[in-house]
Image: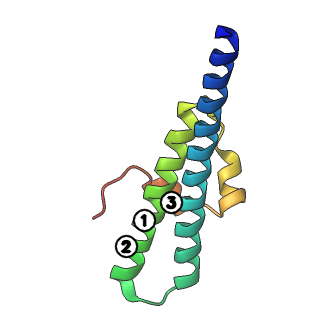
Amino acid sequence: MKRDALLEVELDVRAEIAASLGRAGRRLERAVGALAAAGERGGEAGRRALVHAATEALWACVVQREAIGLTDHAGLREAYGVTSEMWRRMGAAPA
């Protein structure tokens, strides 16, 4: 009986980890999409805000991945359309 309870808790923890990683990925996807959709419209201040939101979402996704032992983030660039600009600005405070 104790073994079943421990297994159930372990499965719940794994499910929450997967859900959390999924939320981080969806947030990144939305932020990158908003930045791409805006293009050059909205002026410099609007673009800066979108870049900041995208880099914050990237940072959160990277932290989530590293917390569970996933340290190779090369696939994020392709999977989510992460740009070099976002990688450079990740973790930096907005100007």
Kindly give the residue lying farthest to the left in the view shown: 95
The residue pinned by badge 1 equals 53
Position of the N terminus by quadrant: top right
Label 3 is placed on what type of residue? Met
Location of residue 80 with respect to 40 vertically, above or below: above
Image marks 2 and 1: residues in contact by CB distance under 8 Å: yes
Location of residue 44 with respect to 83 vertically, above or below: below
Question: Which disc is residue 86 wearing?
Answer: 3
> Relative to the observer, which residue lies in front, 85 or 35?
35
Kindly give the residue lying farthest to the top in the view shown: 2
Location of residue 68 with respect to 27 vertically, above or below: above
Q: Helix or strand or loop: what does disc 1 sit on?
A: helix
Which is in the foreground here, disc 2 or disc 3?
Answer: 2
Using a 10 Å C-alpha cutoff, classify the residue at mark 3 as few (fewer than 14 neighbours), some (14 to 19) or many (20 or more): many
Q: Helix or strand or loop: what does disc 3 sit on?
A: helix
Label 1 is placed on what type of residue? Ala
Label 2 is placed on what type of residue? Ala
Provide residue 67's location: percent of width, then percent of height: 53, 32
Position of the C terminus by quadrant: bottom left
Marks 2/1: CA–CA distance: 6 Å
The residue pinned by badge 2 equals 49
Q: Helix or strand or loop: what does disc 2 sit on?
A: helix
Q: Of callouts 2 and 3, which one flags the residue occurring earlier in the amino acid sequence? A: 2
Q: Of callouts 3 and 1, which one flags the residue occurring earlier in the amino acid sequence? A: 1
Q: Give the residue displayed 60% in from the left and 64% down from the top.
A: 29
Which is in the foreground here, disc 3 or disc 1?
Answer: 1
Within the image, what quadrant is residue 94 found in? bottom left
